[in-house]
Amino acid sequence: MKKHFHKIAKITLILVYIVIIAGAVVRMTGSGMGCPDWPKCFGYYIPPTETSQLEWKANHFYEDGMVIIVDEALQVAKEDFTTTTSFNSSNWEPYTKHDYAIFNAFHTWVEYINRLFGALAGLATLVLLVGSFWYWREKKIITFLSFFTVLGMAFQAWLGKTVVDSNLAPFKITIHMVMALVIVAVLLYIVSVTSNKIKSHKKDSFFTKLLYVSLVLTLIQIVLGTQVRQFVDEQIHALGETSKSLWLANPELDFYIHRTFSIVVLLVNVALFYRNRKLLLGFKKMNWVMLLLVLEILSGIAMYYFDFPFGTQTIHIVLATILFGIQFYLILEANKATNNAESL
């Protein structure tokens, strides 16, 4: 098991990123309430595909917890029963956690697939935890972090439930994103410490410190971005999907801070790129950082000046999370270079 642990950690990391991508697609398509309940979807483990499945039916068997829509409200079956020829309200109780009662098959299945990927990533973290016990004697930190990852995924699942129950409360969405990045960071650390590859990086304390600054700046940008995204969601709800040119016609202060802050992020990483090249430090991932930053800025420009071309919102947030991951791994590489140099 131990010889496969590094590969298991990388697979788990990839699955977590797939969940992040799926979550970005959910937000882009406005599918966050595609399943108005949790963990089931309209009371089903496999969600409905058409409206008729959520309509009350005579002489039909309903299981405890199944959901129907009656007068634009969700009704939940109190227990297992079979209907008669007329609707009996005593068999049902209203869903009280929110008043959202709209069925859209596309939104439902986009959200459901997102949950499936989340469950798959959760299972991967359990496998990771089991494998980590082989490191208990020599590197207990790996077992502790693997256990933290399982707890983190459980927290994410619970938080996903509260996000749905709150009808997509902005603050909870932001916490959801930040926690995903914490899990990514922990998995990257596990991948790093279990790697047998030896990479030659030169020690440079200023470069390492600047890497920390760049990571914090990226994290701030992501948090600001989630606030801007929430504002856009509100505009979509108020103005409609066809009024893309008006979504950012009168943005809030968060947008201007987010846009201006991107210049600071770029300048810091340009300084890192230049220092890496000038001193021949050997951090090749800085090339990826610069490429991602350019693509990130271009996707942001496309959203603002070209009225949100399809996919740009998803690309923007996914690129940001990948950028965060690479920057964090660069810090791990820089710290390894520093430790190696000090031990010589």
Image (cartoon, grey):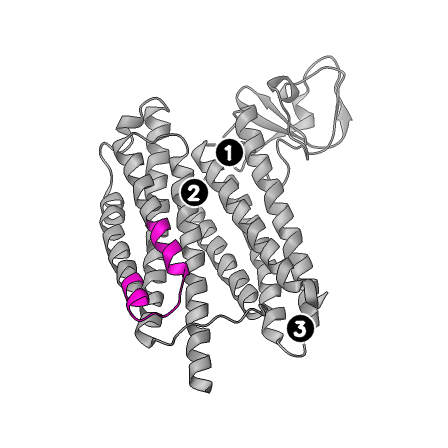
Mark 2 vs mark 1: give the one in front: 1
The kind of secondary structure element at disc 2 is loop
Decide which of tag 1 and tag 3 comes sooner along the chain. 1
- Magenta stretch, main secondary structure, is helix
The kind of secondary structure element at disc 3 is helix
Residue 280 inside the magenta-drawn segment: yes
Cα separation between marks 2 and 3: 40 Å
Decide which of tag 2 and tag 1 comes sooner along the chain. 1
Front in this rendered view, residue 135 or 337? 337
- Residue 24 drawn at (x, y percent): 46, 40
The kind of secondary structure element at disc 1 is loop
- Residue 167 in sight here: no
Instruction: Say which residue label 3 marks.
Output: 135
Q: Which residues are magenta?
A: 273-293
Cα separation between marks 1 and 3: 41 Å
- Residue 50 drawn at (x, y percent): 61, 20
Name the residue type under label 3. Tyr
Numbered badge on residue 169: 2
User: Could you tell whether 332 is left or right of 308 in the image?
Assistant: right
Front in this rendered view, residue 153 or 269? 269
Front in this rendered view, residue 285 or 65? 285
Numbered badge on residue 33: 1
Name the residue type under label 2. Ala
Disc 1 to disc 3: CB gap under 8 Å: no
- Residue 28 drawn at (x, y percent): 43, 34
Residue 52 inside the magenta-drawn segment: no
Neighbor class of circle 2 (other Cα within 10 Å; few <14, some 14-19, many 20+) is few
Q: In the image, is residue 36 above or below residue 133?
A: above
Q: In the image, is residue 151 above or below residue 338?
A: above
